[in-house]
Image (tube, grey):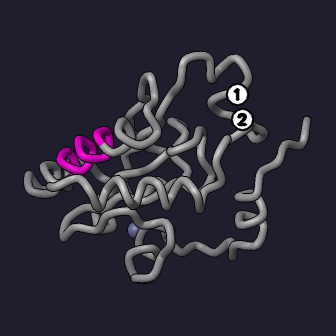
Amino acid sequence: MKRLWAPWRMDYILAPHDDECIFCEALKNEGNRYTLVREELAFVIMNTFPYNNGHIMVAPTRHTGDVADLSDEEMLSLSRLVKKSLKVLQDTLKPDAFNIGMNLGRVAGAGIEDHLHIHIVPRWNGDTNFMPVISDTKIVSQSLDETYRVLKEGFDKVKS
Ligand SMILES: [Zn+2]
């Protein structure tokens, strides 16, 4: 396998691999550098192991892995943040398309199955030519911190 420049892999290597839920952990830690928006029932966070540049996730603030367990208010809050996220990504990174969805259960590919999260992955024409969507080695053109800065500005600009 080829080794590409991938600074976020270092964070992964250095991160403690305990059973702590990364979503709950991010919510507890107010200064978390990858949380983009935090509302009462839902929030948006960067995926630090992205499939593509600008890969973000929308999750309920409550720790649950069961869609049927979500209240209507929580569903609405998640949907509103998905809508807002699409607008921000469109305004800032200008992708040509999006993949949006949830992996429910480990066989479906869920990395963290105990805390629901909706993936939003921006796509550009031709990105699969050189960048496998699901692969350990891929090129992400901006580093996470730079992408975070751009997206955070975008979210701060959009009125809810
Ligand atoms: Zn959690």
Q: Main secondary structure of the magenta part?
A: helix
Residue 131 has which mark? 1
User: Do the numbered discs 2 and 1 sit on residues whose CB atoms are within 8 Å?
Assistant: yes
Out of 23 and 86, give the one closest to the viewer.
Answer: 86
Residue 83 at what x, y percent from top left?
23, 41
Ligand 1 neighbours mark 1 (CB distance < 8 Å):
no
Out of 7 and 77, give the one closest to the viewer.
Answer: 7
Residue 148 at what x, y percent from top left?
50, 59
Question: In the image, 67: left or right of 26?
Answer: left
Out of 157 and 121, give the one closest to the viewer.
Answer: 157
Question: In the image, 48: left or right of 119?
Answer: right
Give the tally of numbered discs.
2
Q: Which residue is mark 2?
A: 135
What is the distance, in whole Å, between disc 2 and disc 1 at their CAs? 8 Å
Answer with the quarter of the image where residue 69 lies.
bottom left
- Indicate the secondary structure of the residue bearing disc 2: loop
Residue displayed at 55% across by 51% down: 111
Answer with the quarter of the image where residue 23 lies.
bottom left
Look at the image and give the residue range highlighted in magenta.
78-87
Disc 1 marks a residue whose amino acid type is Met
Answer with the quarter of the image where residue 79 lies.
top left
**Crowd around label 2: few <14 · some 14–19 · many ≥20 (10 Å):** few
Out of 67 and 9, give the one closest to the viewer.
Answer: 9
Q: Is residue 102 magenta?
A: no
Disc 2 marks a residue whose amino acid type is Ser
- One can see residue 64 in this view: no
- Position of the C terminus, as image quadrant, is bottom left
Q: Is residue 114 above or below residue 135?
A: below
Residue 116 at what x, y percent from top left?
36, 53
Ligand 1 neighbours mark 2 (CB distance < 8 Å):
no
Point out the frontmost of discs 2 and 1: 1
